[in-house]
Image (cartoon, grey):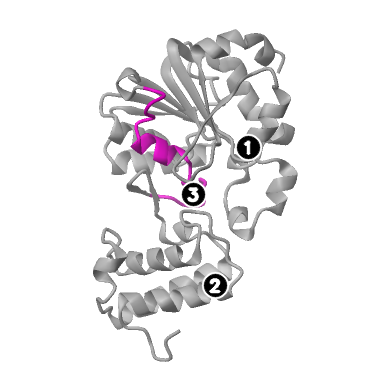
Amino acid sequence: MHSTQPTTVSEHVDWALARLEQSDSFFGHGCDNARDEAIWATLHVAELIDHEFEEVCDQKLSDEQSSRIQALVHERIKSRKPLAYLIREAWFAGFAFYIDERAIVPRSHFGDLIQDGFVPWVRPESARNILDLCTGSGCIAVAMALHYPDALIDAVDIDRDALEVAQVNVTRFAVGERVRLIESDLFEKIEENRYDLIVCNPPYVSSSDTDDLPAEYQHEPRLALEAKDEGLEIVKKILRDGIQHLSDNGHLLIELGESAKILESQFADVPFFWLTSRSGESVVLLISAQQLKTYESSFSCI
């Protein structure tokens, strides 16, 4: 740690890193470690976020920038708010999205899958009509619109506040002609529409587990994190009703986190297939319309 006041980008990162490591901060809302978050905070304030750290590490910052970095890090540690909420920005699928406390911080494994085109499991060119359930900030819907310019996307959420955040992002990226925001409890208000691809990062944390999450999660809307039935209430509804809204050759993808193991144990007769993201985690379920039809009796009793 530097004994004098930091002046360069690198010195500010070292300063921030030392303080973050000494704190009780939890990292999992855009960064999974203190160093990456120190770099993110520094480059954001320095307006160098579009540069690689190694390219600008020796650049000197102004006294005003230095003060802002120190204030930001102190607020991060004191408030235990995710950095994304403090700077009103989160990166997802290669794009910077607006975010505030009305929606959870974008961090889904869908970011990797969208950038990789869901290859080899789903052909992007075959997914012209897409439904994003539990859209939250709209990051998944907007990212898909940006990566797949021929797709039309309906983005659904039960929370009007979250949809207001999503509207900011739809406007920011000028995709309003192809992304339609709908206030709905899952499929309730999408009528008889059918989609080539349905994606969902739903609430899947049980009530008891939500209470035990680090302080950073307590700043996020509980509605977007928590679900009854060991975290599976919403997932089960989607599996039950999804067949009514998929095209014959369509696919459903749901992210489940730790609840993936619980789902498998409750539906031992269903051969669930899990996609592996770049991080090596296999928590995104892929199931085809044909498979939903085959195991309809298993899901219909939900």
* Distance between the alpha carbons at the discs numbered 1 and 2: 29 Å
The amino acid marked with disc number 1 is Tyr
**Residue corresponding to mark 1:** 204
Residue 193 appears in the picture as rendered: no
State the residue position of label 2. Answer: 21
The three-letter code of the residue at mark 3 reads Val
Looking at the rendered image, the disc whose residue lies closer to the viewer, 3 or 1, is 1
Q: Quadrant of the C terminus?
A: top right
Q: Which residues are magenta?
A: 98-122
Residue at the image point whose x is 62% and y is 54% from the top: 218
Please give the name of the residue rendered at 28% of the width and 67% of the height, measured from the top-left corner: 54
Q: Are marks 3 and 1 in contact (CB under 8 Å)?
A: no
Q: Residue at x 29, y 73 (%)?
A: 57
Whether residue 36 can be seen here: yes
**For residue 158, which quarter of the picture?**
top right
Which badge, 2 or 3, is on the more N-terminal residue?
A: 2
When the figure is inspected, residue 98 is found, relative to residue 200, above or below; the finding is: below
Q: Residues within 10 Å of mark 2 (few under 14, many from 20)?
A: some
Q: Classify 10 Å Cα crowding around label 1: few (below 14), some (14-19), many (20 and above).
A: many
